[in-house]
Amino acid sequence: MNNKILEHFLQATNEVFQMMFDIEFDFSTPMEAKSLHYDEGHICAEIALLGDIKGTITFKFNADTALDLVEIMCGMEIDEVDEFVKSALGEIANIISGNALTTLSQEEIIGDLEPPLIITQSKKYEENDNVHITVVDATSDIGTMNFVFVEKDQ
Amino acid sequence: MQEYIKQTKTGSRKYKSFVRADFLVEMTGRVCYHIDIIFKKEIVMIWKDKYRLGVAEIDKQHMELFRRVNDFVVTLRSKGSWQEKVDKVNDTLQFMQEYVVIHFKAEEAYQLKIGYTGYEHHKKLHDDMVAYVTEVAEEYEREGYKEELIQRFAGKLLAWLINHVVAEDLKIAQYTIHKEEQK
């Protein structure tokens, strides 16, 4: 995924987080990765991208950050990552990705997305000839998250 | 005062300060006392002042909608076994489900009244959500009132609703204010 497309997702993330949570992220420079391991203790909302962009974008939250976000939304203490929490995070990932695709369509890059898949267990990606992995770290007052772009060749 | 949550010096998630419009709630030994106050006064915990759009008619509707959703989420997230709370969850789900439709219709009527140019787009967002709510409610009943499905539904609804208000409904408020300024 080239950096221009990536920029749309990062911009959409900050817009949505500012509006919903008053939170702004600082993003690292995109880094290419040879392999990727989702370790336990994180919640990953993975969205498959179709159309002109093929691959997946994953929003990787550490568990405490995820719980804090859901607490802000519902105003009550949340102690564990359950279906309610996973679904709320999946919807946030869905909203961000939808907004990014809307702005990309204005540049005639047309895409679609599939419903979010929530991964809480260990998962590993390996780079190969057809798959390229890019990672962006995001930091904010509430904690950290990572973006993982797994791009498949057209 | 705008509501927010901040970490205390301990950095622990268990010890937080919740600063609300009228309350300073420290999650320490006094937690039970303060939480009791919040529930007795029926404070809508998911509502925040930042969701206020500055158009009285819309804000009033939103506060009522958030109150309904809040009742549903509080009941759903209350302590106790699923068997103990399922009847109450079902009642609040039904109230909330009915009010979502009433609210959307009222908001659409308001948009038509002011000649809102984004009406068609906004109505489609509402229609899609109503279709989703109906689909889940049917599945929930068909599958015998399973907790997992309704927890997933509540999480999505909460995030969708907050985003819808701060992103989409904000546009209606901006349109209204712009029209008022032009008069």
Image (cartoon, helix red, strand yellow):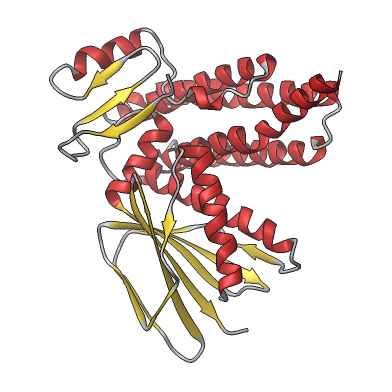
Q: Is residue B162 visible?
A: yes
Q: How many marks?
A: 0
Q: Position of residue A140 (x, y in %)?
A: 37, 49
Q: Nearer the viewer, residue B88 or A110?
A: A110
Q: Residue at x 45, y 63 (%)?
A: A58
Query: Left or right: where does residue A105 sit relative to residue A32?
Result: right
Farthest residue, direction left: B29
- Screen quadrant of the C terminus of chain A: bottom right
Q: Quadrant of residue B115?
A: top right
Q: Is residue A152 above or below residue B179?
A: below
Q: Residue at x 42, y 28 (%)?
A: B73
Q: Nearer the viewer, residue B77 or B125?
A: B125
Q: Residue at x 62, y 26 (%)?
A: B100
Q: Position of residue A135 (x, y in %)?
A: 41, 71
Query: Left or right: where does residue A25 sit relative to residue B63?
Result: left
Q: Nearer the viewer, residue B161 or A141?
A: A141
Q: Position of residue B155 (x, y in %)?
A: 45, 40
Q: Is residue A141 above or below residue B117?
A: below
Q: Position of residue B176 (x, y in %)?
A: 77, 24
Q: Is residue A21 above or below residue A55?
A: above
Q: Is residue B142 visible?
A: no
Q: Residue at x 50, y 38 (%)?
A: A20
Q: Is residue B183 above or below residue B97?
A: above
Query: Left or right: where does residue A28 sit relative to residue A112?
Result: left
- Screen quadrant of the N terminus of chain A: bottom right
Q: Quadrant of residue B112?
A: top right
